[in-house]
Amino acid sequence: MNDEAARKPFPVSWDQFHRDARALAWRLNGAGPFQALVAVTRGGLVPAAIVAREIGMRVIDTLCVASYDHTTQGEMQILKGLSDAVVKLGGEGGKGLLIVDDLVDTGKTARVVRQIAPKAHIAAVYAKPMGKPLVDTFITEVSQDTWIFFPWDTGLSFQPPIRDGAA
Ligand SMILES: O=P(O)(O)OC[C@H]1O[C@H](OP(=O)(O)OP(=O)(O)O)[C@H](O)[C@@H]1O
Ligand SMILES: O=c1[nH]c(=O)c2nc[nH]c2[nH]1
Ligand SMILES: [Mg+2]
């Protein structure tokens, strides 16, 4: 389902996101050793910064993919693959690389990431049921018919009272 209006809104504040990303870092702290951290751009950049700080990683790369135009999923494009230096740090198939994204939804992005680095550890802060089996670690599961609104995509706005039809 790609229609944002038909989905249950799940707004996440900066505070909540920081807490959830820290919880992910707690879990990942014992899951290594990791030679490098890779953020799946752009959404993975924010949790990657928090996880890197918490588990003491300083070699950080990006895997740049694009698939959604706002809420409509289109063709997956790999705009930049893993850097040679990071590929060399990891073992065969990306073993020892920690790859972080903000969420896994249909699993399309994670599937592409897996093809690139089948032995890497893939982590996401949030997971929907379809994507859940494709990640090694996640923190919070939300239903498939939920649309997560991240704090970097939203701002404060007036909320109509519940009795006037607020969601
Ligand atoms: O499991 P999937 O159905 O593939 O959806 C999850 C992906 O979708 C979003 O990225 P998006 O492609 O919108 O780009 P962005 O990170 O630049 O916002 C999100 O950050 C995940 O990477
Ligand atoms: O901001 C977002 N919220 C979502 O629930 C989602 N699913 C895929 N891509 C997404 N982006
Ligand atoms: Mg993304």
Image (cartoon, helix red, strand yellow):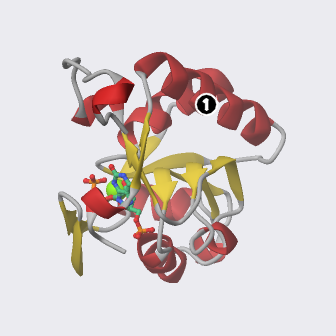
The residue drawn where x is 53% and y is 46% is: 37
Indicate the position of residue 153 as horizontal and vertical percent values: 24, 36
Q: In the orientation shown, which residue stands out farthest toward the right?
A: 30
In the rendered view, tell whether residue 49 sits above or below residue 120.
above
Q: Which residue is mark 1?
A: 20
In the rendered view, tell whether residue 126 sits above or below residue 16.
below
Q: Is residue 141 left or right of residue 58?
A: right
In this view, the residue in front, 114 or 35, is: 114
Q: Is residue 75 left or right of residue 83?
A: left
In this view, the residue in front, 16 or 166, is: 166
- Amino acid type of the residue that numbered disc 1 sits on in the rendered structure: Asp
Residue 15 shows up from this direction:
yes
Location of the C terminus by quadrant is top left
The residue drawn where x is 50% and y is 74% is: 107
The residue drawn where x is 64% and y is 76% is: 92
In this view, the residue in front, 40 or 8, is: 8
